Image (spheres, rainbow, N blue to C red):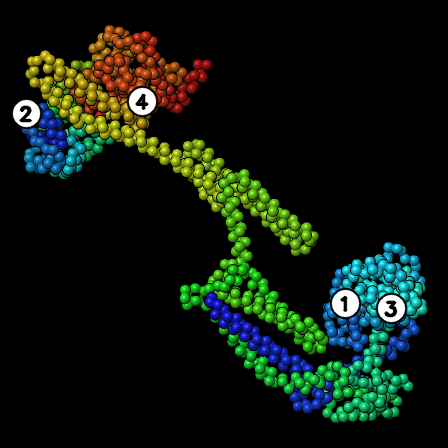
Amino acid sequence: MNILVCDDDKEIVEAISIYLEQEGYTIWRAYDGVQALEVANTQDIQLMIIDVMMPNMDGIHAVLELRKKSNIPVIILSAKSEDTDKIMGLTIGADDYVTKPFNPLELVARVKSQLRRYSKLGSMPETSKNVLVNGGLVMEDEKKLVTLDGEPVKLTPTEYKIVRMFMQNLGIVFSSSQIYESIWEGDSYATENIVSVHIRRIREKIEINPKDPKYIKVMWGVGYKMDHID
Amino acid sequence: MRPSVMVKKFISVAALGLIALIAMSSITFFAYMGYEFGYRDLQCNQFTETRKFASEFMFTLYNLDNSADYVKNYEEHMTTGGVYLTEAQYANSEIRHGDMQYYRVEDWLNSGEYYFNASQYGIVDLYSANEEYNDSWYGVTLDSMQLRTQQSFTVITREDYIELLLNYAEPNATVVDDFSEEDFRYFVTGEEYAESKVTTSTEMTESYGDTTTEAADYIDNSFSPNSYIGYYDGVMLVYSPEENMFYSSLYGWYTVPEKLYFLTSDVQTCTGVDLFLYQFASEKMLFKEKVGEDYLYYLCEMKNLNYTGRNIMYYVESDGQIYTNGSREKIEACNQYFCIKPTASGEYTVDFHNFENVYMSDEFVTGLMQTLNALKPDDTLYVGVFTTYPHPDSFATGYVMFHEGYPLTIPMLVVGIITTIISLLWFVRVIWTSGRVSKEDKTIHLLFWEKLPVELFVVALPISIIVMGIIWWEVMAALFNYYDTYIEMVPLIYVACYATFMTSLLSLVRRGKAKKFLDKSLIRWTWGLLKRTMIALSRQKNLVARAIELFAMYWLVMLIGVFFLLMDGNGWCFLFGVGIIIAVNIGALVVMVVQAKGEQNVREATKALADGDLEYRVKPMRRLGTEQEIIDNINHLSDGLHKAVEKSISDERMKAELITNVSHDIKTPLTSIINYVDLIKKEKIEDETMLHYIEVLDQKSQRLKQLTEDLVEVSKISTGNIELERVPIDFGELLWQALGEFGDKFTEQELQVVDNIPEQSCMIFADGRRTFRILENLFQNIYKYAMPNTRVYIDLKNDQGRIALSVKNISRAPLNIDASELMERFVRGDQSRTTEGSGLGLSIAQDLVKLQEGEFEIYLDGDLFKVVVAFPEYVDSKMIEMEEPDELLEK
């Protein structure tokens, strides 16, 4: 697997390369947008990690250029951590956005996730009635099996029920008490804490970064929901 | 203009004046000759053959006939006709008896305006009956005496008047009563005068001038010491009883009849002494005699008939009476005469001597026939003319004119036409050449008198024309009517007028050509003064002084108005005064309204400014300067404030941006540090010391990361540079979620959470993520600083619309600082700052609470650390509607 890492800070490129090479990936290095596009055009690249603020051509323009020809996963790695920056990055065609300073393990996990999804596109198992799919998350109810980007996820029965409830009701917000009543089928008195603890644990299992969840989102002060993901 | 040019111009103008004078004189001469003589007279050789001679002859004859009629008629009704003389007035200059003339002035149509009867004597003038102007009517007052009645008055010479008085007074005499002492101004007897002469003569001379001195000398030589001498209103009067004669400095000598009668009710009979005394009596009493007006005419007509000083002589024999101003023999000695004798058959025999070539116009014949018709049979009329013209009358004038002036008529006409054309052309040239553009500097040079106001010339121009016209008319009138006028002054006045006229005209032309007509003018000066005054007023910085000045100006103009108002109670001045007062008051109103409007604007502006509308600008007004200054100042103030606020906003934004950028710049190297520290950790390092070092590096780099993020957060929140997405949320639910997130961490620190969260929802209107951040920070705080193995109390209460969360824990380290200090940025519970954390947590939490209109309080009591976060309860309007009926039912 060829991964293109592009950052004007050579040490960062080097560090990322070390981590990814440990995982067995081949790393192509670039130090500005122009170089990145050259590499992407000449080599068979499966994924690109690119910084935003670079000389010659910045990351945003590079991604825009890249997207004219290629649909490989792109992870933007930027020190810009504002919401607007993230929205911008994701809007122009990036698949993920990681802010500096980043956790190397998280980055690697995200790279893997993107690659899995990219390589398995088109070879999706056919959806049956008992198979729930949302993004990389697949739940085969008959087998009581949950996979994330193809990797099986170990869930407790309660956690499994909660996930199934969300996947059956994509986009619907459930408050703690509703979840409790539905899962535990009992009085909700003074037990909301249990729900939030369970959900945190589920997130830790199915999310790459539990503090920035992709699947089960926290509506603070309202409840939890799972949004539909392509 | 160069001096030589000026001299040339002067000569040119003077020449123009001369030529124009010649032209006018020639034309006038021609007109005059044409008036006096006809076209026919051109062929005459003798004066007697001319039309003028004939008309002159007829005119005289006609007058004599009228006089004769009057005299005859008067004598017929003398016995019955009463005439009245009401008042008389003195005159003080000499008149030769031969110059005697009189005018009958009649009040036509009883209009109060007097006209000379022009039918007889050819002099017409207007005279107002208004009392004030009695003394000043034209040409008569000073030279004659006036006898007035209600309807008319007659003017005769003073000699005739006295004669009239003395002769006619007797039949209607009244007795003089006593005089009061006050009526006498001053008089002495000759004896007293002689005694006091040495001492008084100087005084008298000074008082009464030459007349008095002459009179006094005369008295010294001629009068007996018994004479009475009096001075009255500048008139010296002497009465000598021995000679029974009067001397008056006005009249000269005259005798007094033995008895003198005065005809007023106050005066009956008097002697010469009485008459003398009477001169000093009240003027009003004098000459209130009843004297017949007709008698005056009678006297005058008699004089006319008997007048010998003319070149025509008549002789009438009628009913045995002879009327003549000479004698038959004298007429027959005349060069030319005719004699008319009616025959018994009603025919006339007219015997002409040397009258063959007399111009016999229709008028002449008619006039002659009228005269003949008045003659009765046996009457004889002789009329003769001395063709040597020994007497200076109109015949003599006509003769001279015919022989000396008349031949020049046609040449004068030619001269007149030529000079008129020349002067017109010259005039145009003078106008054309004046005010030319100078060849040297291409501008029109103005003369020094062009610095004088233009109005002077605008007024002088018509006045000089009018004066010249009047004088010309006067001169012509005098020439045509054979009377003397102030002709000696005419050339001087004419030159002055002409100079004024040309100066004014050329000055106006030059100003006009230079397009500087109003540059030097009273209008512009007045306007400039007014403008300067207004500008000075408007620039007056001292408002009190300005108010006083305005008030003073107002009253100045008001007083001018009142002055005009009072000067003339009901005329134009009154209207002018009223106009000024109205105008100045309207002006004052305008000023007040403008000032009030300015004040209004200023007030609105300051109000808007005080209310924080920094965009508000006072509308600029056309107005006096001070208000404008206030408005400008206010606008400047608004501008300044606006800029200051904008600057402070932009400063804050820049500060936030700076922090964001700096933190971004820190983040990049920090990434490498963290990553490589992580990589080092993965190396198999055995050295304990090294491992410890790496651990420190790891911790500090992680903390730096946290610090950077918090810094950005703090700067954003404190500058208000975040957007809150506030929605109704359940604080209880949020609390459970947060507790769920932190459950493991609290367990890790062996902290037991004692929660007291109400079952029912506690809705607040807040941004869920930010509010979670508040709780996160609080819980983070507990996690970091709470004493392990203690209880943490979390209570949520809905206290009458106030959702309050209280979090209590026991601090691990002694809290030796103040509560308020604790919330300051970068302050942490442990002074050593060894533990993880930026010290910004509480500060961020507090700012976020405040941003969402909540309350944030920290209480420290020993080791007890308590935080209270309170928000107002969110009440859905729909929910209220649903709840209300329940509440009502309960009650």
**Residue at horizontal 81%, vertical 61%?**
B201
On screen, residue B179 versus residue B689, left or right, reads right
Which of the image's four quarters has the C terminus of chain A?
top left
3D distance between C-alphas at marks 3 and 1: 32 Å
Q: Residues within 10 Å of mark 1 (few under 14, many from 20)?
A: some
Q: Please state which of the two labelled residues, at mark 1 or mark 4, is closer to the viewer.
A: 1
Give the numbered dot on residue B141: 1
Badge 3 sits on which subunit?
B
Q: Residue B826 at x, y = what percent? A: 27, 19
3D distance between C-alphas at marks 1 and 4: 116 Å
Any part of residue A124 in sight: no
Element type at marker 1?
helix
3D distance between C-alphas at marks 2 and 4: 46 Å
Q: Is residue A92 above or below residue B372?
A: above
Any part of residue B549 in sight: yes
Badge 1 sits on which subunit?
B
Q: Amino acid at mark 3?
A: Ser
Give the mark nearer the N terminus: 1 vs 4: 1
Question: Which residue is disc 3 drawn over?
Answer: B222
**Residue at horizontal 21%, vertical 28%?**
B664
Give the numbered dot on residue B848: 4
Q: Residue B691 at x, y = what percent? A: 11, 14
Question: Which residue is disc 2 drawn over?
Answer: A24
3D distance between C-alphas at marks 4 and 3: 138 Å
